[in-house]
Image (tube, rainbow, N blue to C red):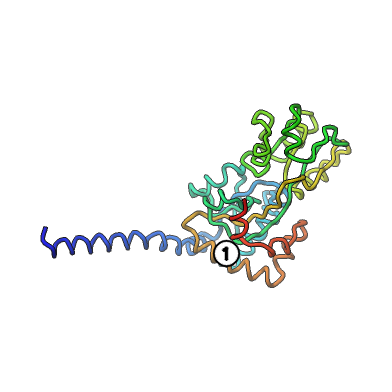
Amino acid sequence: MKLRDWISVAAGATALMAMAAAMPATADENKLEELKAQGFARIAIANEPPFTAVGADGKVSGAAPDVAREVFKRLGVADVVASISEYGAMIPGLQAGRHDAITAGLFMKPERCSAVAYSEPILCDAEAFALKKGNPLGLKSYKDIADNPDAKIGTPGGGTEEKLALDAGVPRDRVIVVPDGQSGLKMLQDGRIDVYSLPVLSIHSLIEKANDPTLEVVAPVEGAPVYCDGAAFRKGDEALRDAFDVELAKIKESGEFAKIIEPYGFSAKAAMSTSREKLCAAK
């Protein structure tokens, strides 16, 4: 091959690579326009009050969807449409294009931060246990459950609590995955599990609604970290995430953020005192 031919081929290859590199960015930049035209954003939720909730009439509420609805509205996207998903299925569903965002108390962790593009923090909470009145097995930490060969714990599938229990040494056969809060509470009442674990506000909401004097709450769980979530977007949708962050920062500064989440029991100050960078780097 002559030198000028080689230069021509090389130049063409370079141009093709540059075009390929530019294509995801173009698709990324167009995502918000697609949602505006669509008129809604598809969000994944877990139906776990007060993080997320679906009423009998199908209306979606809860702190996370309410924040997302307000932010998307400011971005020109009229509404949000939610689908209920187990935590373990949310990120695969997002990556497969079934959701435009996850707004469900999906707490930031390094492994999740490498799989999705999180917004800045929105909701923060600690962990709690629901148990039989008097806490007959004396369970105050995930390690206590691991150390008691008779203790069984119920957790959401793919959720933080399942991982915390397994990391503490609770054997897989004593970590019982349950589909939702009501199922977990029923298993606890029936004696099929000894403790049910969720974030503090979720457990308190379940126990309050159950109005069952045979149950009590241990909160916060000893040795368990405080976590924060954010809206999660597909890798490649960073422009949409960044636009979301701009409007999220505005409602935090204006006080609208606190008005949305604090009636649900969350602290705006807690979410505003940390950052995505810190939370994604935490071990």
| Quarter location, residue 158 | top right
Picture layout, residue 1 above or below residue 132: below
| Quarter location, residue 133 | top right
* SS at mark 1 in the image: helix
Q: Position of residue 96 (x, y in %)?
A: 48, 47
- Identify the residue at image location x=49%, y=64%: 239
Would residue 96 be found to the left or right of residue 90 on screen?
left
Picture layout, residue 198 above or below residue 69: above
In the displayed image of the protein, which residue is found farthest to the left?
2
86 and 16: which is toward the camera: 16
Q: Label 1 sits on what residue type?
A: Phe
95 and 125: which is toward the camera: 125
Q: Position of residue 60 (x, y in %)?
A: 67, 52
Picture layout, residue 154 above or below residue 102: above
- Number of numbered discs visible in the structure rendering: 1
Q: Position of residue 273 (x, y in %)?
A: 69, 64
91 and 112: which is toward the camera: 112
Q: Position of residue 265 (x, y in %)?
A: 77, 56
What is the quadrant of the N terminus in the image?
Answer: bottom left
- Identify the residue at image location x=61%, y=64%: 71
To which residue does mark 1 refer? 244
- Identify the residue at image location x=63%, y=62%: 275
